[in-house]
Structure formats: C-alpha cells, structure tokens
Image: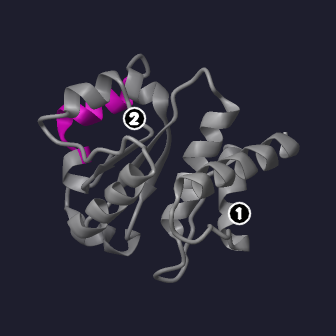
Amino acid sequence: MAASIERSIVAALDHLNVSREKQKIIVKKEQEMAVKELLDGKNVMAILPTGFGKSLIFTIFAIAKGQISRSEKTCVLVISPLKSIIDDQIAELSSLNYRAPELSVDNMASILSDPPQFVYCTAEKVLEKSFLDELKNSNTAIHKAVSAIVVDESHTVESWTPSLRW
C-alpha cells in the first residue's frame, strides 16, 4: 500500500507541475506526511503557518486519490469562512483545469448529482438542511464521492455560527 501511495503522490505532483506555468511545486516534509496520512484513510489536522501551502495538501490528496481509485469519484469539500480565500483557490484550481465550484443555490443540484473534485463553501452554506441531508445520506452521489472535508481557517470556527453542531 505504501508504494501505491508514493506512486500516486508522485503522479499527482507530475500532473500539477505539467499544468502549472509558474515555478515547479516542491513539497515540504509536513505536506507530504499529511497527504500520506490522508491517503492511508487517517484523519489529519495540519496546523501550519500562514503561507505554508496547506491547500496544496488537499489538492495533492484529491489528485492522488483519483489516481488510486480511478473508478470512484473523489471530492474534497472545503469549508472556509473567507470569500477571498475561496475565490483565490477556485481560480488556482480552474487555471489547472479542475472543476472547483463554490456551493450556491444555483449549482447545488449539479454538485449533488455529479460531484466535482473540489467543492468550496462557507460554514453557513454547508449547514443548509438540503445540502447537509444529501451529504449525510449514504445513497447519494455527494456522500459517496466526498473523500475529505477540509476546514480552512479553522481557528475561526467558533465565530462562524452558533449552530455549527452536526
């Protein structure tokens, strides 16, 4: 299994580096460890400095997971309180030709029926009853596809909403 994880990470990095026009990605030890743990099915809490490249962890994970389980959809649900971060990450993934929409009323049905590799949303949006019910229902496409739920800027979770109870 470890060799398979290593190969999938290398393939994900190769894919990202081919897609990028900027400088090549160099993965830090902490990022690699987090990706390996995620691919091994473990929960990960990555507390790293601002600008360290935490989003690269779940980007590499999603691509590598897709390499490992080609027949299954892989979706990473990214919950962030900051619209500017959501917009920046969506723009970066879109430039690499990944479908990474922000969850909205207009695209919810599409996301639920055909989950993309990445879905961005605020805590308030993910807690909307219609989305949460679909996410919890083990028979739905979104439930089957979500391989990771990322809480970005988690130090602000307490201030997101008093109803953040699953």
Instruction: Tell me the residue at 29%/70% (across/down).
Output: 158
Q: Is residue 134 magenta?
A: yes
Q: Amino acid at mark 1?
A: Glu
Does the rendering let one see residue 8? yes
**Residue 59 location (% of width, % of height):** 53, 53
SS at mark 1 in the image: helix
| Amino acid identity at mark 2 | Pro
**Residue located at (70% from left, 34% from top):** 68
The answer to whether residue 42 is seen in the rendering is no
Residue shown at the point (29%, 31%) measured from the top left: 111
The 10 Å Cα crowd at callout 1, few under 14, some 14 to 19, many 20 or more, is some
> What residue did someone put label 1 on?
32
How many numbered dots are placed on residues in this image?
Answer: 2
**Considering the numbered disc 2 on the image, is that residue within a helix, a strand or a loop?**
loop
The residue that mark 2 highlights is 116
Quadrant of the frame with the C terminus = top left
- Tell which residue pokes out farthest to the top in this image: 139
Where does residue 115 sit, x and y in percent of width and height?
A: 38, 30
Query: CB of mark 1 within 8 Å of CB of mark 2?
Result: no
Label whose residue precedes the other's in the sequence (1 or 2): 1
Report the front residue among 150 and 60: 60
Q: Is residue 122 left or right of residue 72?
A: left
The label on residue 135 is none
Toward the front, the furthest residue is 21
Rendered location of residue 84, percent (x, y): 24, 69
Whether the magenta-drawn stretch holds residue 42 is answered as no
Q: Position of residue 21 (x, y in %)?
A: 51, 63
Instruction: State the separation of the CA atoms marked 1 and 2.
Output: 23 Å
Looking at the rendering, the stretch of residues picked out in magenta corresponds to 126-137
| Helix, strand or loop for the magenta stretch, by majority | helix
